Image (spheres, rainbow, N blue to C red):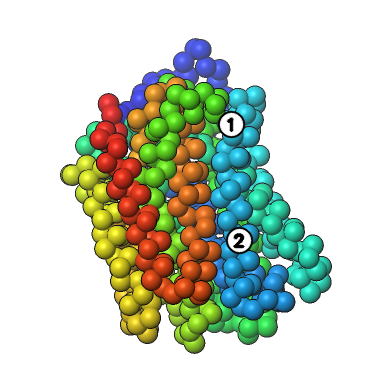
Amino acid sequence: MTVSYHGDYPAEYPQRGHAHGARNINARDGEIHPEDIAVGVVIGRASEYFDFFVYAIASVLVFPQVFFPFESRLDGTLYSFTIFAFAFIARPIGSVLFMELQRRFGRETKLTVALFLMGMSTAGIAFLPEYAHLGAASIVLLSLLRVGQGLAQGGASDGLPSLLALSAPKHKRGWYAMLGQLGAPVGFIIAAGLFSFLLAQLSTLDFLDWGWRYPFYVAFAINVVALFARLRLVSTTEYSRLLDDHQLDPVNVVELAQSQGRNVLIGALAALASYSLFHLVTVFPLSWINIYSTRSISDFLELQMLGAALAAVGIIVSGLLADRFGRRTTLGTAATLIGVFSGFVPMLMDGGDTGQNVFLLVGFVLLGLSYGQAAGAVTANFEPHFRYTGATLTSDLAWLVGAAFAPLVALGLSANFGLAYVSLYLLSGAAGSLAALSLNRALEIKE
């Protein structure tokens, strides 16, 4: 779909100077193309995922020693993963609160407040005194800042992913759907590379004392850049009108639940396999190696970066497969492969360096194939009036159900009952996805 506006702004929309300059940068000859929308989606998702993985990696390598020095390494990591989950619990709450803010003051105000909250929460973690200096108060503050990140993540939704899905040409909808998902491997590669460099260059004492704070400073700086980049997009008259034309505005959550509750539930469960696998190849194996292996953490992060690059390739391939065979078929096939893969978790993770390497690389490939089409899988199933709110809350619930507690559950089960239970956990995610997909025969984006 291409939306064209020739000449000046339409008479019913007042001209705004800053929007005019942004339009000239982000639209060609007054036209908005799907690739223009994709720019905003990729910028927003890459910055969000960098923040996400900076915290996730620190939850394994830093927080157990810095904030839980009185516990064993295992218990400290489990406590750290508990706080890690707080953001996913807060995320749907943030979505609801910030939607109300958008209704009152507009999309630009909502996005500005959300990204500044994210930046302040991230910077706050960078400056947070450790347990040795502040005691239990440091844990409370870390928890509050993590909740702040979750609220901000919920409020950072700008409607562009849904707009991209609805504006893409019919024969390329799978391709455009995967573009925003590339932010995950890109964010992970940058975050893991930064931590790997610091670990290789600093002593353990220096890293735990001050070195770990630098990725959070970088995350804050990226937030500032992303804020202005995204505001430049959503504040233009063309984007505002296109969002309005597709009725991508918030609605009452109670009304949504009553009218579209089935679609929300199916959408959250349809991507369960992908979201369950998401942390089982990123956060969990890093914690397992950190606790039970003598492997170099810096080298292991580099291996995960290679895996993330393979995931990026898998995401791209998923777009091609979805356009050829359909998104529902692509997601179902990926969920089936993840279910098969779950049976090999104990053998590979207990298989020494070679087995762990295979687990990571194959897992990342499967993650790319599934995650590439996981976002907004049922967006078009919502009635137009409910589409924006429905897509946002569906994504929030998918993260909460599939990913929030995955590192905590996987590490806890493997430490107390064995890796076979991690297999069952991943298998349950695959089964949930297949069950949801079987209930939704019209998963592909409708006309």
Judged from this view, the residue extending furthest toward the front is 417
Query: In this figure, which residue is indicated by the disc labeled 1?
Result: 99
Q: Position of residue 150 (x, y in %)?
A: 60, 48
214 or 307: nearer the viewer: 307
Q: Which quadrant does the C terminus fall into?
A: top left
Q: Residue at x 35, y 71 (%)?
A: 345
Q: Is residue 64 visible?
A: yes
Q: Position of residue 85 (x, y in %)?
A: 58, 56
Q: Is residue 28 above or below residue 277?
A: above
Type of amino acid at the residue the image marks with label 1: Met
Q: Position of residue 439 (x, y in %)?
A: 29, 37
Judged from this view, the residue extending furthest toward the right is 134
| Direction from residue 361 to residue 99 in the image, left or right | right
286 or 268: nearer the viewer: 268
Q: Position of residue 10 (x, y in %)?
A: 46, 15
Type of amino acid at the residue the image marks with label 2: Thr
- As drawn, the label of residue 82 is 2
Q: Is residue 46 above or below residue 395?
A: below
Quick one: label 2, few (<14), some, or many (20+) residues within 10 Å?
Answer: some
For marks 2 and 1 on the same chain, the one whose residue lies earlier in the sequence: 2
